[in-house]
Amino acid sequence: MNITVDVRGVDAVKAHLSGMGKQVSFAASKALNATGKAIADAMPAEIERVIDKPTPFTKRGVRVLGYANKERLEATVGFMKAQAKYMYWQVEGGARQPGPAGLRLPSAINVNEFGNIPKGIIKQLIAVARKDKTKGGKDKKISKATTTRIRVSNKVELFYGDPLDKTGKTWPRGIYKIANGSLIPLVVFPVTPARYRAIFDFQRIAEGIAKREWSRQFDIALAGALRTAK
């Protein structure tokens, strides 16, 4: 999910032929880095426009990953490693295979303002469902803060695991609340692949910005380099 900006204009070739190769290379490297930064700076707004409720962490995930210099006239822009792990599916689409723990899909549980399960909730719910003990020997309960965040009462009984399939229905492994003898899924961990449609055209957006910025940035950088040439 990286785009490499590698552009050399006609003016650069003309200047090079006139014996100004060093100034041209310096200007080109500055222009490439400025163009790469313009791409990275534009991405938060583009992500906000396309992705539903992106987190601030996601919006600041695009960086200039490789800078140009006089010997290497190439700048690379892309998502940082952490954001790339999940943004890959928004950019490329495809089938995401579940890991050993399965996928985490909220069902009858409130998510945060970004559509995600609040941090630490899964671990806390599993501890309650497993009837882990507190230091005092009592069964753990959902904290009051958690009940407010996820709208699940701390008085309900929870089940964690693989329910027996009944009446032709397949129950995935998950965290369920028990109500009137029935199981109501809170969070499930299916082991089937999740399919994604590519919705964020990173390549097209980045290339559009590069085409718009490159000539302007190069003209500015070249003019500065020629002014200070010895």
Image (cartoon, rainbow, N blue to C red):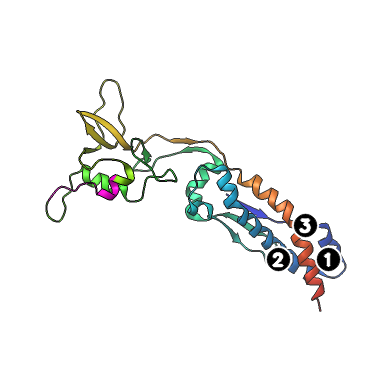
Q: Residue furthest right?
A: 18
For the residues labelled 2 and 3, the Cα–Cα distance comes to: 12 Å
Q: Give amino acid for label 3.
A: Ser
Is residue 140 magenta-colored? yes
Which quadrant would the C terminus be assigned to in this image? bottom right
What span is in magenta? Answer: 138-147
Q: Looking at the picture, how far across and down is residue 23, in whole percent?
A: 78, 70
Badge 2 is on which residue? 30
Badge 1 is on which residue? 16
Q: Quadrant of residue 166?
A: top left
Q: Looking at the picture, how far across and down is residue 156, in whole percent?
A: 21, 38
For the residues labelled 2 and 1, the Cα–Cα distance comes to: 16 Å
In this view of the protein, which residue sits in the foreground, 22 or 199? 199
Q: Give amino acid for label 2.
A: Lys
The residue located at (47%, 54%) in the rendering is 82
Q: Give amino acid for label 1.
A: His
